[in-house]
Amino acid sequence: MRRYTGRTFALEIVMVAATLVIAFPLYVLVNMSFRSRTSTESILAPTADPTLENYRTAWEDAGLGRALLNSTFVTVVSVIIIVVVSALAAYTLARVTRAWSKIVFIVVMIGLLLPFQLAMLPLYATIRDLDLIGSLWSLVLFYSGLQVPFATFLYVGFLRATPTDYEEAALLDGCTPLQAFRRVVFPLLRPITGTVVILNAVFVWNDFLTPLLYLSGSGTATMPLAVSTFVAQYSSNFNVVFAGLLIGMVPVLVVYFAMQRHIIKGFSGGLKA
C-alpha cells in the first residue's frame, strides 16, 4: 500500500484547484439558465426560484428543434464519410510498402499542415460554383475534406501496430482484400474508430465559423448559428443565451460520455506505431 506523502497532498491540491477552475464557468452557466430575467441575485448564489421559462423561450424563438436536426444530419453524415474514407485509405497505406504508398501518405499529411485560413476564400468560391451555398451538403463536403487527413493519420498509426495474422488467415480462406478489411480488420479498429468519431463529432457539432460562411442568410442554421441569434435578439437577457447553450451541449455530451473510454484506448494504440 502506497504511503500518503507530501507530494500526494500537493497533487490533490492541484487537482482540486483545477476542478474548481473548470467547474466554475459550468456552474454559472447552469445556475443562470434557471434564473428569471428580473432576478437580482449574485451569479454565485444558487437560484432561489428556478424556472424553465428560459429553455422554452430559447427552444421556440430560435427554432432550436430544426437546428438540432440540421446539426445532427451534418455531424452524422460527415463522421460516417470521414470514418469510411479514412479507414480504407489508411488500410492501403499501412499495408502496402511500396514507394508510392509512402509518397501518398506524405501528401495526405501535408493536408494537416495547411491552415484553414489560407484555403477559406478558394473553398468558398468552389462551394459557390457548385451551387451549394445555403445547403447542408456544403458543410458535409467541407468537414469530410478537412478532417480526412487527421483521421487517416490516426488509423495508419493504429494499423501499423496491429498484427496481420487474422487478415492473412482470412485471405488464405478465400476472402478478397475488401472482404478481409470489412470482416476482420475494421472490427479490430474499434478503439481508434471511437476516437475518430468523438473528436470529429465534437468539432463538427461545435463549429461556428463554417456554418456562418456557408449558411448565413439562407434560413438554414446549425445549433451554434441558431444560438448566436440570441446575442443580438436577447442581448440583455443572457439567461436565455445560457439555456440555449446548454440545449446545444446535451447531444454532444451524451455521445462523448457514451464513447469516452475509446479515446484513451485509441490514442494509446495509435501511439505505438
Image (tube, rainbow, N blue to C red):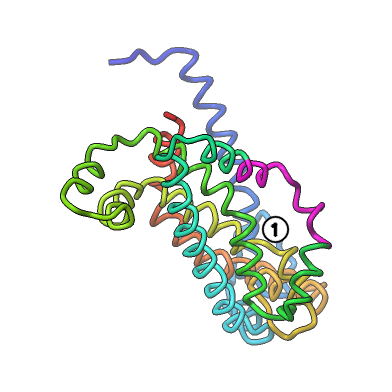
Q: Is residue 180 left or right of residue 7?
A: left
Q: Residue furthest left?
A: 173
The amino acid type of the residue labelled 1 equals: Ile
Residue 89: horizontal and vertical position, in percent? 48, 51
Q: Residue at x 69, y 82 (%)?
A: 220
Q: Residue at x 74, y 78 (%)?
A: 133
Residue 242: horizontal and vertical position, in percent? 66, 67
Q: Quadrant of residue 46?
A: bottom right
Tell me the SS state at disc 1. loop
Can residue 110 be found in the magenta stretch? yes
Q: Is residue 180 left or right of residue 6?
A: left
Q: Quadrant of residue 162?
A: top left
Can residue 97 be found in the magenta stretch? no
Image vertical order of residue 193 relative to residue 218, above or below: above
Residue 17: horizontal and vertical position, in percent? 59, 34
Q: Is residue 128 left or right of residue 103?
A: right
Image vertical order of residue 79 relative to residue 5, above or below: below
Q: Residue at x 82, y 75 (%)?
A: 232
In the image, the segment drawn in magenta is 107-121
Q: Residues within 10 Å of mark 1 (few under 14, many from 20)?
A: some
97 and 217: which is toward the camera: 97
Q: Residue at x 75, y 53 (%)?
A: 116
The residue where tag 1 is placed is 43
